[in-house]
Image (cartoon, rainbow, N blue to C red):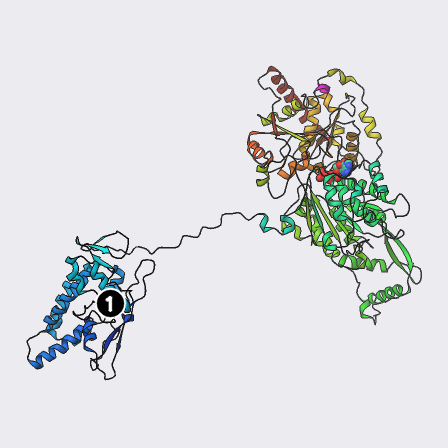
Amino acid sequence: MYARYVPPPKGIAKSPEPSQAIEIPSHPPVKSQPTAYARYIPPSKPVNGQFNSLQPSQHVHFQEDDNGNEPPTKKAKLMSEGDVTKETKKKTKKAKQSKEPQTTTEVIEEQASQTKLDENEIPIELNALEQGEAQQKVPVDQSELPDQARKEKKSKKKSKKKENHEIHEEVEDETPTRHKAVLERAAKSIRPPEHQSIAEQHEDVVMQDAPDANGKHQIQGDDNPMNVDANVPEVHGLEPLPQPQPVVSDATRPAYETLPTWLAKPIRVSPQATAPFTEFGLSPELGITSEVAERLAANGYKQAFAIQTAAIPLLLPHHDKKKHGDLLISAATGSGKTLAYALPLVRDLSQGNRHLTRLRAVIVVPTRELVKQAQQVCEQCANVFGLNGTKRRVRVGISMGSQSLDQEQAALIEREEEYDLEAFAKRSRRLASQSGYGSDDENDKGYDTEDEEKSSIKKKEDKIQTLPDHVIAYKSKVDVLICTPGRLVEHIKYTPGFSLNFVRWLVVDEADKLLGQNFQQWLDIVIPRLQSSNNSRNHKQSNLSGVRKVILSATMTKDLDRLEGLKLRWPKLAILEGSGITEEAEATINQADLALPEALEEAALKVSDPNLKPLFLLDLLQSDYILGHITRDGSRDDISDDETSSSGSDSDSDSDSESDAGAGRSFRPPNVVSVNTNTPSVLIFTKSNETALRLSRLLSLLSPTLGALIGTLTSTTQYVARRRTIRSFLAGKLRILVASDLVARGIDLPTLDHVINYDMPSSVASYIHRVGRTARAGKAGKAWTLFTNPEARWFWNEVASEAVIQRSRKVERIRVTEEKEDAFERKVAAYDSALKKLGEEASEWKSRPRQS
Ligand SMILES: Nc1ncnc2c1ncn2[C@@H]1O[C@H](COP(=O)(O)OP(=O)(O)OP(=O)(O)O)[C@@H](O)[C@H]1O
């Protein structure tokens, strides 16, 4: 079924309601109401040049007039096919009645001939979909047709259906009807005479579009010259409708924007930003006085280093506590981070009551060596603030496991009997309750302690006999405790009287290491004990209360998950910029803001045969780059040994009784050389303790001259031996240290000239810490890295790349070993026999009876 346009009869063109789109109601017209008539409702305007699909059912309304009769002219004009059917039936009936010989077919043909004319005049067609819709929506009541008429109509329909594909549906006239007459006259006046007759028949619909003399469809009243062949139907497929542009997914990587503002927008400090210590603080009283600055200068601290100029003012007292929250410091190795926190911390503690010592600051570092180093700096600061006698001298304690726990407890906590009637009564009730006598005070039954370990400590303490009406009281012997995390946890759990209740400073140095490994879950144990806020945590000269945290590293993490454990308050991040960084590199520099000391020079050399790696190292050591002038002078071999005696006679302030079992020393040959502090010093890093020990001995076997200068530092070496080795090195008696990563972090060897990565570091951070043992505090220093073929890509892409680490100059590539020379053959032969000797020594050492 389909919709058909029924043209109006001639002479009714001036009808105020032109018929264009004809619609049949979805229900067939009721037979008993033949007088209904259609009223034209203008169609909606085309959108974007496309015509809306015709919706016939929306365009025609049937209305009865007051008398229930349809106006005859309108009826004729607006008849649809359905109407035609009805009209035909009526006419047939009338014809039968009046005996006039007009058949249904004739009526249809008459109508159809008129329709065809109209269709030819309206060449704009519906697309296939619209036609289909129109066909589906036009109901024709076939049952109302007489059989003959139905058959004829069917055959007509078939042929018309065919035609209908070619026939164009009419365009709905958008012209307002009240202008119709005017426009019609205008159209007639401009229309060529040969078209006049056709156009005249359909002047009510053909106002804008009419075919020209060649059968082309001319768009009138429009400048558009496009002609359409009226006889060739436009083929419209089911082309997809125009779609919106696909949404391009955001390919930008979230970076800094995903971080909180304090991490994304850190305080950046230029390496050149040095300043006098007196320039800090809101006022001289709240800062570093000139007197203190003079004493600092006497200790070698003449001016504040760049990172100190940023950190110290932030850590000094301030009236706005939000401006002085926790501080994270990311600054290159050797840039002076220790003094940056030690100075304001010790200053704050030295303002307190002269006679009251309480544990108020805890400094956590990963190794014992660093404990000693931080202790040294804190002692210097304590001296600086305590010298004039008006201020209390801050007491600094250490805890790092080099002594037994009992010894440390005695050094940290003082135990005495104190007269306290109330406390004595409570203790008596607790004891009575434990032994079954009961207690009427429910609150006294338990122990008001932080955890189970503390409760058991309390119970033991209760049982210690005291003077009548006296209880045991504990007092801290130190204001500042510098410790390793493991030992701190042990004291919290097992040391009577050890309390963090008064702590108002927490410093975490080498934070990325300490947060990354969380030794003994130290953070989970320590941080909750620092959360309580009470008057005992008030800071002097400011309205800040609670624990102030200072977190430091040369490779500071920006991992929020890790930092979360610290429970930071109003944090700020201060970053020491690298020097000489190009804009290009700055754009790609990674999130950790890694930087190397400005004065550091770096070089790398390839080891073509990993089996001969010790030979490549030896060549480097004996080259002019490092020790050449000493090791090539064989005459020095017979110079007397003063290293062994001096090293052995070093007194150790640690008061340890451990014997020196330094592995390097036990293998040292008797022929040694005398050197002085001008002799270049070298620190060689290996990947493991075992490699360090073997390499150290191998070098001694290969070059007895060098053997006299070599010391070894590994974590299996006893602490006292390690300290002695370091002292010998600092004194210039040893010039080469072979070490595992034990001393890669934090250790300050001011006389160190060269660092050699014999084995490749395990990470970029590890490289930074290793090479950062030299070029400290603005001094010159060189780093050398041996790389094998498989290691080359990672080294050059990750470590040596300026996009990863900020550095002032590029990594140089050097070559020292000439493998094609005859001399190299001899070296290889010597190396083979040294290896053999090493094997013999190792088996001899293994078979030696162990000392009890
Ligand atoms: N203001 C200063 N003036 C002179 N020397 C200083 C100053 N501040 C620190 N130093 C010296 O700089 C050296 C390096 O300092 P420090 O050990 O604190 O560095 P660091 O930044 O902690 O390095 P690392 O990251 O390797 O631990 C030390 O020898 C220290 O005495």
Q: Is residue 316 left or right of residue 599?
A: right
Q: Is residue 95 left or right of residue 639?
A: left
User: Is residue 195 shown above or below 831?
Assistant: below
Q: How many marks?
A: 1
Q: In which image quadrant can residue 67 be found? A: bottom left
Q: In which image quadrant can residue 10 be found? A: bottom left
- Whether residue 627 appears in magenta in the rendering, the answer is yes
Asked which secondary structure carries label 1, the reply is: helix
Residue shown at 41% from the left, 52% from the top: 246
Quadrant containing the C terminus in the rendered view: top right
Near mark 1 (Cα within 10 A), the count class, few <14, some 14-19 or many ≥20, is some
User: Is residue 692 shown above or below 517?
Assistant: above
Q: Is residue 789 left or right of residue 459?
A: left
Task: Farthest residue to the right: give it.
Answer: 468
Residue 806, image x and y in percent?
A: 63, 37
Q: In which image quadrant can residue 82 be found? A: bottom left
Quadrant containing the N terminus in the rendered view: bottom left
Choose between 433 and 65: the one closer to the eye.
65
Choose between 622 and 274: the one closer to the eye.
274
Choose between 208 and 774: the one closer to the eye.
208
Q: Give the residue at mark 1.
A: 181
Choose between 206 and 395: the one closer to the eye.
206
Kindly identify the amino acid type of the residue bearing the numbered disc 1. Answer: Ala
Q: Is residue 583 left or right of residue 710?
A: left
Residue shown at 72% from the left, 23% from the top: 706
Residue 452, image x and y in percent?
A: 76, 59
User: Is residue 218 shown above or below 336?
Assistant: below
Residue 718 visible in this rendered orientation of the protein = no
Q: Regarding ligand 1, which quadrant of the image does it lie in?
A: top right
Residue 718, image x and y in percent?
A: 76, 37
Residue 109 visible in this rendered orientation of the protein = yes
Residue interval drawn in magenta: 623-631
